[in-house]
Amino acid sequence: TLPRADCNLLPAIVTSRHLSPTGGCVMSSVHESMCCFRSRMQRLRVASSKGNYDVLVGRGAWGALRSFARGKYTTTFVLTERGLWQRWGKAFCREGRLRNAATLLIPSGESSKSLKMVERVAGGLLERGADRRSLLIAFGGGVVGDLGGFVASTFMRGIDYIQAPTTVVAQVDSAIGGKTAVNVGQMKNLIGT
């Protein structure tokens, strides 16, 4: 099973929201201490053949998590890497008001983007009571985003998820457009939704 951390232990960084595989919305933000983009939060509307969604960018976007995590969801989970969580988890939970979110920690690196890790994360969600009305927040770089999105799109045939990209590549690539995939052997992004 995956190690667990509680939201009231640590600090935070960036956000993004994408509703389940059938459509939705995305938010992407950068915490002011992470980059030189210091403007207030802005909402950008993206029109796509797969559906329209919003992207939230700028200081304060983590606070927008407050409206997603309340009432609508039976449980909230944060998928992240240990080092990132130790540095930013507390602030992320505080700004997003994620007091009751359970945290699923994965090892850093490309090796976590695998079917074996999909099984571990899905098992961790099930073990902690996730259901079709749960929310998964992928808080990390491209590996966390791809893995989290793939798990969210396949767990119980799809649950809502929020991308919280913490690297520039994740912010401009993996968190936007809803592409999610995992690697099989040496083949990158071979299986995805």
Image: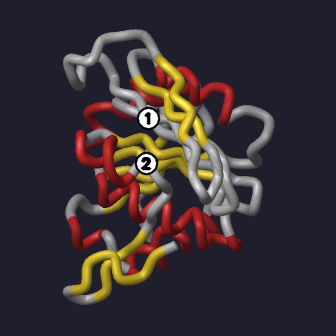
Image quarter where the N terminus lies is bottom left
| 140 is higher (above) or lower (below) than 62 | below
Q: Amino acid at mark 1?
A: Ser
The answer to whether residue 135 is seen in the rendering is no
Q: Amino acid at mark 2?
A: Ile
Count of numbered tags? 2
Q: Residues within 10 Å of mark 2 (few under 14, many from 20)?
A: many
Q: Quadrant of residue 17?
A: top right
Q: Quadrant of residue 131?
A: bottom right
Residue located 62% across and 37% down the image: 100
The answer to whether residue 66 is seen in the rendering is yes
- 66 with respect to 180 (left or right): right
Identify the residue position indicated by label 1 in the image: 28
Q: Residues within 10 Å of mark 1 (few under 14, many from 20)?
A: many
**Camera-side residue of 43 and 127:** 43
- 106 with respect to 4 (left or right): left
| Mark in front: 1 vs 2 | 2
Residue 71, how many percent across, how many down?
Answer: 79, 35
Residue located 20% across and 86% down the image: 186
| 189 is higher (above) or lower (below) than 107 | below
Q: CA distance from mark 1 to mark 2?
A: 8 Å
Identify the residue position indicated by label 2 in the image: 176
Residue 72, how many percent across, how many down?
Answer: 79, 40
> Decide: marks 1, 2 in contact (CB < 8 A)?
yes
Residue 193, how many percent across, how many down?
Answer: 52, 73
Residue 191, how many percent across, how many down?
Answer: 42, 82
Mark 1: secondary structure: loop
